[in-house]
Image (spheres, rainbow, N blue to C red):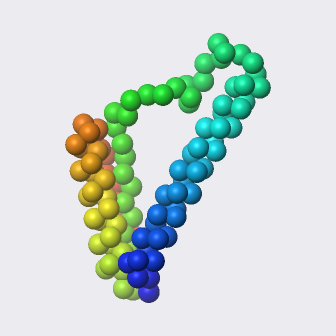
Amino acid sequence: MQSAASFNASHNSHITTSNTLLFAIFQVYKTVLEACNQEDLQLPILDVRDVKKVSLVVVTGDRGLCGSYNSAVIKAATRRLNKLKEQGIDVCLFPFFSS
């Protein structure tokens, strides 16, 4: 059984890892552009755009003693959903119930 504290530590670790990965991907694209020496090269993936719509994928479980896990996931998703709505961003929610 995983305690709430270890779940939060694990969750925060995954977020940090994904942010690091996104930064590394951006750096790779930037390096490729610099290697091409072509400023007029247009790659849509490098454009900075305003966020208009966000999809949230929420995965809960039903095996064993997963009540605290489900509660933590739903609370985190609710906080994120409310924060995005406050910013005027359209949110599409995809709940998955794993078994």
The residue located at (29%, 45%) in the rendering is 84
Q: Say which of 66 and 20 sits in front.
A: 20
Total marks drawn? 0
Q: 17 left or right of 95?
A: right
Image position of 70 with respect to 88: above or below: below
The quarter of the picture where the C terminus appears is bottom left
The spot of residue 87 in percent (x, y) is 26, 39
Q: Residue at x 45, y 77 (%)?
A: 6
Q: Name the side, left or right, on which 93 lies relative to 46.
A: left
From the top left corner, tell me how far across and down residue 47 is, in percent. Answer: 52, 26
Left or right, 39 with reference to 86: right
Q: Position of residue 82 (x, y in %)?
A: 23, 50
Quadrant (top left/top right/bottom left/bottom right) for the N terminus: bottom left
Q: Residue at x 31, y 79 (%)?
A: 67
Q: In the picture, residue 60 is in which quadrant?
A: bottom left
The single residue placed furthest to the top in the displayed view is: 40
Q: Position of residue 36 (x, y in %)?
A: 76, 22
Asked which quadrant contains residue 77, the reply is: bottom left
Asked if residue 69 shows in the view, the reply is yes
Placement of 80 over or under 10, stated as above or below: above
Q: Is residue 97 visible?
A: no
Q: Quadrant of residue 78?
A: bottom left
Residue at 24 percent of width and 43 percent of height = 85
Eyeballing the image, is 66 above or below 9?
Answer: below
